[in-house]
Image (cartoon, rainbow, N blue to C red):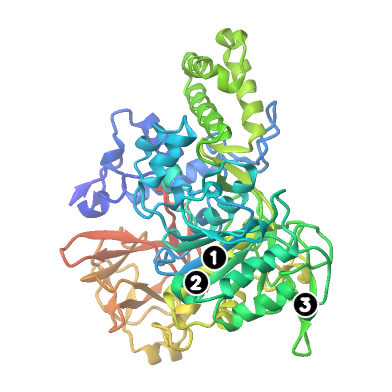
């Protein structure tokens, strides 16, 4: 048994090895209190959680973005959290599925083969060596594997395909919007070292550039993209199960008279789920393809870039609507309210175009800001002066003090909605839709037999109702990625059909049906133990680990000791148990041991109730 370098308490050595990646503000807090501590030593979960709570208590109840001049363009609540939350920090995700083997097609104004789309790992240092020149960036990226299976340029009425087309490597503004939507669905976050990854970072992509040479995208151009997908063998050959459309039509028209909507219906019948952005008018007005009955139309939610927990009504009530379009359409003699689903629509991180002047400027600004934040005003001045031509700076910057430098940097960063040296914050239902498309890709990976109609129904069934907001504008509620995948696994014909969702509270009838022994959470020596005390509640817990040799439950209730509370393997690669918890909140994860005897901890992908751990990823929570 090892010892925590902070408190000296006993910690399993393999578990301690998993604790080296702390949330940066927590790491800095530990270093300030223990100057001789090194991050590679790790700290025990109890110490990490204690620091995370102390850090969280210092968050302001109101945003700090207006407390300085100039204001930032995004809200934030702690001086050391000067950025935006990632997708998985906003909505509980399912880390067991990443879209592998699922094709997602995009119809948009243009694209760029960003480093976040590489098939393998990216050498970030090598990329930085090429950032100064668009030609060098292209040569570097052409040498990387890509998850883009096909690129088709349909502009000007002709179809051109291939990865050597000049339009694919253009840093024109029209290339950015499609790159943004694709990254929000399938980006792996390479340039953020994984933090700003999407829900389906292993999905393959098909990019279809539509529109006219002047950049406009009228309905005939959207229709051309849909017809390209329906033509020949494109759908089966490219493995397309999901189509994301973050562009809208020209004017209101009945869906059964609209060729774009009819093409969406044809795609659905061909086995493809179409995800459409609702639009940003804020009016009761729907345009194609958002009004197509079979499409899942996505509106927007504003979380204020604030952390919240799904099981806390007070925190849910802080969520607000984005100004999305809405309305009703009639199909099969019944009204269908649209949007059917909401997803975050603002303060989302998305990459800027690599090799563009904006990308180079944001990188310099980020390095200078970091230097200034560390008290290195001299270093910040040197960086800015070295790149004075790029930034169009004059000689006075060489002698500017820290306060002047901070104002200068913020003005320039605000111009690009800066949140990271390679990412800016974006908004609109254009960014809501790709998040739903990504979760749909996870669902099809989890259960390949799902139909698009069934996937849409499960996305809606798993949504979080937002009863404090107008129902006509919220549909089924807010996207819940983890629960949507969990329901897909259990749908008819799915690999976990018949099993409860992990985290479910069990009654006597459910226990009898499962035939699982009940284990007591707090008895450290317990194996399959006596029945729970009368005040305890029994919860079903499970995880997908088909290659594991053993799985156990570790948490705040058993000193985070692996092997004490074992899970039982089913013949489907699913491990599960029933555990009696005393009243209160209990943090936990699964401890998974592979066939070589190596252990690692794993998040419960199905339980959406999570709490900051002090590490990069949260802990799951059981509320008994």
**Left or right of 56 in this view: 475:** right
Residue at the far front in the pictured view: 158
Of the pair 253 and 371, the residue shown nearer to us: 253
The residue positioned 76% from the left and 71% from the top of the image is: 471
Instruction: Name the element at disc 3.
Output: helix
The residue positioned 60% from the left and 52% from the top of the image is: 110
Tell me how far mark 2 sits from mark 1, CA to CA. 7 Å
**Left or right of 362 in this view: 509:** left
Give the labeled residue for mark 2. 240
Tell me how far mark 3 sits from mark 1, CA to CA. 22 Å
Tell me where residue 353 appears, x and y as whole percent: 55, 42
Among the 4 quarters of the image, the one containing residue 410: top right
Tell me where residue 4 appears, x and y as whole percent: 26, 44
Marks 2 and 3, the one that precedes in the sequence: 2
* 155 up-or-down from 406: above or below: below
Give the labeled residue for mark 3. 255
């Amino acid at each position: 048994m090892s010892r925590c370098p902070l408190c000296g308490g006993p910690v399993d050595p393999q578990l301690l090895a998993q604790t080296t990646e702390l949330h940066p503000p927590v790491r800095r807090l530990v270093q300030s209190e223990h100057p001789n501590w090194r991050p590679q030593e790790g700290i025990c979960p109890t110490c990490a959680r204690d620091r995370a709570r102390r850090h969280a208590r210092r968050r302001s109840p109101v945003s700090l973005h207006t407390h300085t001049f100039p204001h930032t363009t995004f809200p934030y609540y702690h001086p050391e959290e000067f950025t935006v939350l990632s997708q998985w920090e906003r909505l509980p995700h399912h880390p067991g599925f990443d879209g592998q083997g699922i094709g997602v097609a995009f119809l948009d104004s243009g694209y760029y083969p960003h480093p976040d789309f590489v098939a393998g790992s990216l050498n970030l240092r090598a990329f930085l060596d090429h950032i100064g020149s668009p030609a060098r960036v292209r040569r570097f990226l052409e040498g990387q594997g890509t998850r883009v299976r096909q690129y088709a340029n349909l502009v000007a009425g002709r179809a051109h395909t291939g990865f050597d087309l000049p339009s694919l490597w253009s840093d024109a503004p029209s290339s950015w919007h499609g790159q943004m939507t694709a990254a929000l669905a399938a980006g792996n976050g390479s340039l953020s070292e994984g933090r700003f990854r999407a829900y389906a970072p292993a999905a393959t992509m098909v990019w279809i550039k539509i529109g006219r040479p002047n950049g406009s995208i009228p309905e005939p151009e959207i229709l051309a993209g849909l017809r390209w997908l329906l033509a020949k063998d494109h759908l089966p050959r490219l493995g397309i199960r999901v189509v994301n459309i973050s562009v809208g039509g020209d004017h209101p028209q009945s869906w059964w008279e609209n060729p774009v909507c009819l093409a969406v219906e044809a795609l659905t019948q061909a086995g493809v789920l179409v995800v459409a952005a609702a639009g940003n008018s804020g009016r009761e007005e729907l345009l194609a393809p958002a009004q197509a009955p079979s499409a899942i139309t996505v509106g927007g939610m504003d979380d204020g870039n604030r952390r919240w927990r799904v099981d806390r009504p007070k925190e849910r009530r802080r969520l607000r609507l984005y100004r999305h379009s809405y309305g009703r359409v009639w199909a099969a003699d019944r009204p269908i309210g649209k949007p059917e689903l909401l997803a975050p629509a603002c303060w989302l991180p998305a990459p800027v175009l690599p090799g563009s002047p904006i990308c180079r400027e944001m990188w310099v600004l980020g390095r200078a800001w970091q230097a200034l934040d560390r008290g290195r005003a001299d270093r910040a001045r040197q960086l800015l002066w070295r790149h004075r031509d790029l930034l169009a700076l004059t000689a006075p910057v060489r002698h500017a003090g820290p306060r002047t430098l901070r104002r200068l940097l913020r003005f320039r960063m605000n111009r690009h909605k800066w949140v990271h040296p390679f990412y800016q914050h974006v908004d609109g239902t254009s960014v809501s839709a790709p998040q739903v498309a990504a979760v749909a890709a996870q669902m099809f990976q989890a259960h390949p037999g799902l139909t698009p109609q069934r996937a849409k129904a499960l996305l809606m069934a798993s949504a979080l109702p937002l009863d404090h907001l107008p129902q006509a504008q919220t549909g089924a509620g807010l996207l819940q990625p983890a629960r949507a995948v969990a329901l897909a696994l259990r749908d008819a014909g799915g690999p976990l059909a018949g099993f409860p969702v992990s985290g479910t509270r069990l009654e006597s009838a459910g226990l009898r049906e499962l035939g699982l022994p009940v284990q007591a959470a707090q008895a450290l020596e317990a194996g399959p133990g006596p029945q729970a005390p009368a005040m305890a509640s029994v919860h079903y817990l499970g995880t997908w680990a088909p290659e594991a040799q053993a799985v156990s439950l570790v948490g705040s209730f058993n000193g985070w000791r692996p092997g004490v509370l074992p899970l039982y393997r089913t013949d489907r690669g699913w491990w599960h148990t029933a555990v009696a918890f005393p009243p209160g909140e209990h943090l936990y994860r699964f401890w998974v041991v592979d066939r070589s005897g190596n252990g690692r901890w794993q998040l419960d992908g199905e339980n959406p109730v999570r709490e900051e751990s002090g590490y990069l990823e949260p802990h799951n929570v059981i509320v008994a």
